[in-house]
């Protein structure tokens, strides 16, 4: 069964709440707002009825140390796939890589928790390698349903990068971001359970 990956639309908020919990709606809106400001894309895997996963592709790193060392390049953040181990995460990552390369990026990065061995294996299998200068600290807030911050998290992360092969900007990559278009950004075959 193919896994489609596309940009988030306002119609997706109900599906996001069903997939990841209504308490995280403010989080999803913030990621969508980043897309609306032209600072990145909020990519969703699944069909119009169900969201199986998501990632934010920002057009520059959120970590000042990374920007200082390497300049601006796209960065993935907040990858989730449900259920894990069925190819959804891989499809999302490849779609983000394709979208970044279509914009002219030659490198993409991401931070992964030092204690997240499964994600570390996935990223390394897909060609990501340590960036060299050491760990970064991923700081993020946890709001309640009303948007009030209830916790601040500071997670040590390994920062990984991958060199991207140049790709031509094609309709199949870019059409998901055009207004009133519903075509998929990327489709990948799902592994059988």
Image (spheres, rainbow, N blue to C red):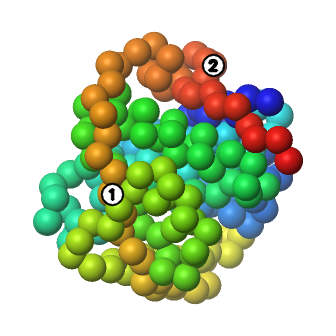
Image height check: is 119 above or below 35? below
* Residue 34 at least partly seen: no
Residue 23, numbered circle: none
For residue 157, say whether it is visible.
yes
Give residue 98's position: percent from left, percent from top: 43, 33
State the SS at label 1. Answer: strand
Task: Return the x and y of residue 156 as percentages of the image width and height.
Answer: 43, 84
- The residue sitting at 47% across, 23% down in the picture is 173
Q: Name the residue under label 1.
A: 161
Q: Mark 2 points at which residue?
A: 182
Residue at horizontal 85 percent and vertical 47 percent from the top = 193
Whole-angstrom CA distance, mark 2 to mark 1, is: 30 Å
Kindly report which numbered mark, 2 or 1, lies closer to the viewer in this rendering. 1
Relative to residue 33, is residue 67 depicted above or below? Answer: below
Would residue 164 be found to the left or right of residue 55 on screen? Answer: left
Q: Which quarter shows the N terminus?
A: top right
Report the side of 83 relative to 105 (left or right): right
- List x then y, in percent, for residue 74: 33, 48
Q: Quadrant of residue 190?
A: top right
Q: Which comes before the other along the chain, label 2 or label 1? A: 1
Q: How crowded is mark 2: few (under 14 residues within 10 Å), some or many (20 or more)?
A: some
């Amino acid at each position: 069964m193919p896994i489609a990956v596309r940009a988030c639309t306002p119609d997706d908020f109900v599906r996001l709440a069903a997939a990841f919990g209504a308490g995280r709606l403010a989080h999803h809106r913030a990621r969508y707002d980043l897309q609306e400001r032209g600072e990145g894309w909020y990519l969703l895997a699944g069909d119009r009825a169900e969201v199986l996963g998501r990632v934010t592709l920002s057009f520059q790193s959120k970590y000042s140390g990374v920007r200082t060392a390497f300049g601006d390049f796209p960065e993935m953040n907040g990858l989730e796939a449900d259920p894990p181990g069925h190819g959804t995460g891989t499809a999302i990552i490849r779609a983000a890589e394709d979208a970044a390369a279509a914009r002219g990026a030659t490198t993409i990065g991401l931070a992964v928790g030092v204690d997240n061995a499964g994600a570390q294996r996935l990223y390394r299998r897909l060609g990501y390698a340590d960036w060299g200068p050491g760990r970064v600290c991923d700081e993020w807030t946890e709001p309640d349903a009303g948007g009030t911050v209830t916790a601040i998290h500071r997670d040590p992360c390994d920062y990984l990068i991958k060199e991207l092969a140049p790709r031509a900007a094609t309709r199949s990559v870019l059409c998901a971001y055009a207004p009133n278009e519903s075509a998929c950004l990327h489709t990948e075959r799902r592994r059988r359970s």
